[in-house]
Amino acid sequence: MSFWIQCRLQVCLHDNTHLIVVTTKDESAQVKQSRAIGPFFQLSALAGWVTLALGFVVGAVISLLAFELIYWGKVYPRVLVQGLRVEGKTEYETEALLASRAEDVDRIDPAILLKYQENEWPILKAEIGFSYLPAVTARQAMKVGREGSTAAQLGQQWRALTGTVRLPLDFTYDEELLMTKVATVAAELSVPPVPPEITVLDRPDPSGSWVEVQVGESGTVVDVDEVKMAIDDGLRWGTTLVVALPVKVVDPGVSAEELEETRQRAEKLVGKTLTLTSDEQRWSLEAEDLVTFLDFKGGFSQEKIVEYGKTLAEATDRQPQDAAFQYVEGRVTQFRPAKDGLRLETEKAVGQIESKLDELLTTDEEVISGALSVVRATPSITLEDVNNLGINELLGRGVSTYTGSIAGRRHNIALSANRINGVLVAPGQEFSFNASVGEISNATGYQQAYVIRSGATVLDDGGGVCQVSTTVFRAALDAGLPITARRAHSYRVGYYEQNAKAGLDATVYAPTTDLKFLNDTPAHILVQMINNAGANTLSVEIYGTSDGRTAQILNHRVWDIVPAPPPRYQDDPTLGPGVVKQIDYEAAGAKAKFDYVVTRGGETIYSKTFLSNFQPWQAVYLRGV
């Protein structure tokens, strides 16, 4: 065995014969012997190889043990944090070193600098609650080569010995605060693209087209996620915190061919109307509205139809309303009619709208209609359940608008409507507007507004009350009630023709001029007022029990129109010099009439012709002196 320890072995293979060359330690003898060896020498050579392998393993184990003893409780070699070598240091020493490093970095770069072209936006680290975490990173450095399976640990140790392990310096900050600041900067640089747009012209262009297409414009956007990644990388590796903002161009993304194809489809919608209904409501979409639903990629924009469907649902949907009814001393003090709940089936409605839009592109019809799917829900309490006066249903409704009224007139409309609201009229009883509204004066809460008196427009208490009497007149006509007293205004008042034809008005002036109607129905009737000041709309509803009657307004006409005289100016010392204020508006004189016919079961039970003789009226201006 000592022979092999003291000798250098050389074994080769030649023509299937094993040769051995032995060189002894006696350098002077230089004895070399070579002969063919047999099986014995083959086994001896194999034993030599095994011995060498064992020696290598033993050496490796000894080396590994020595390595572990040297770095016991210390960071393995070639571990760097932000380029700082921490090998051979304990966790405490590493933390202290990294804390010093963090202070240096924060002192050198106290802010994150966002930059675009010549513009800069600094974000102080303190503003986002930023701080490095040396203790966390020190623990991570200690885990290199000591975490995971044995194979993983050996692999990490080998990489530490033969290469470099680079670690970031851990940190924390308020991500929401940072993104808010980045988004604020991004908003300054971002310009949303202008999408292509189609408009319907008032008249055809020189080429004969009724449609104009604007191609849109490109926009710009800042990729805030990319900005955050760049900031995180700079903080993590301690590099200079100057972030060039990635401003990208956003194209509308519509080709010339798509623009032209969409224009041709829009031409097919010119002059067409889509009418949509949902039980109690009705919407009409003209060409100007229809073309906005077109998608430049073909067909119609599902997103826009869905959005429009949501708008219709907001206008349609309501919860069931239970009836409420209470009256004291012959007057209703609380009233709420029962109403079915409504819910637009939006998903079905969107499909129905899209189907009708497709139909408009292929049909020659100028107007098509579509009913939208609505689900009804019945209230649990109806009017029949809460009163014994026979007030069960809506008999008639009148509406007027008063856009442009001065504040005093609005006040008087609301006050007189409130005085009328809740009035009960027994069967066979005559309704009197003047008796119901009571005294009209400053003492009863009315303000001054313009009224017609003695052929002139003057300020007086209660101006605007005739808006209420006119609306009650229209409701009584709609309910089919006999009108026993009514007088038209002296001239055509613009308020009363904002939503109705000339002649559907009624003036009142106590004690000489009144509006009256008779309750000839089988039960009490209730006069209910709804004043929507925001919409400048007054509604009067008459409730009771229907006996099957139907009212019609027939043969309405206006004739003998006379132009208005020149405007008149009145001096008003309350106005400053040179100040001119219009208080009345010109109106052409005319005669108007209509026939009022009430039938039941095919038989006429009441008829009357209403005539109005309107004088020509001049515009009136107040002039400061």
Image (tube, rainbow, N blue to C red):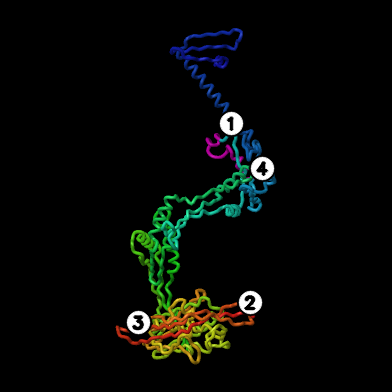
Sequence-wise, which precedes: disc 2 or disc 4? 4
Distance from disc 4 to disc 1, alpha carbons, whole Å, reads 24 Å
Q: Residue at (54%, 51%) from the top-left corner? A: 220
Label at residue 98: 4
Distance from disc 1 to disc 2, alpha carbons, whole Å, reads 97 Å
Distance from disc 2 to disc 3, alpha carbons, whole Å, reads 56 Å
> Does dot 3 land on a helix, a strand or a loop?
strand
Q: Can residue 285 be seen by looking at this rendering?
A: yes
Looking at the picture, tell me which residue is in the foreground, 55 or 242.
Answer: 242
State which region is magenta: 134-155
Q: Can residue 136 be seen by looking at this rendering?
A: no
> Does dot 4 land on a helix, a strand or a loop?
helix
Distance from disc 2 to disc 4, alpha carbons, whole Å, reads 81 Å
Q: Disc 3 designates what residue?
A: 550
Sequence-wise, which precedes: disc 4 or disc 1? 4
Quadrant of the image for the C terminus? bottom right
Q: Nearer the viewer, mark 3 or mark 1?
A: 3
Membership of 92 in magenta stretch: no
Q: Residue at (64%, 41%) from the top-left corner? A: 91
Q: Are marks 2 and 4 in contact (CB under 8 Å)?
A: no
Q: Position of residue 423 (x, y in %)?
A: 46, 86
Distance from disc 3 to disc 1, alpha carbons, whole Å, reads 102 Å
Residue type at mark 2?
Gly
Q: Disc 1 designates what residue?
A: 162
Q: Position of residue 345 (x, y in %)?
A: 39, 65
Secondary structure mainly formed by the magenta segment: helix
Q: Disc 2 designates what residue?
A: 578
Which image quarter: residue 92?
top right
Sequence-wise, which precedes: disc 3 or disc 1? 1
Membership of 150 in magenta stretch: yes
Residue type at mark 3?
Thr
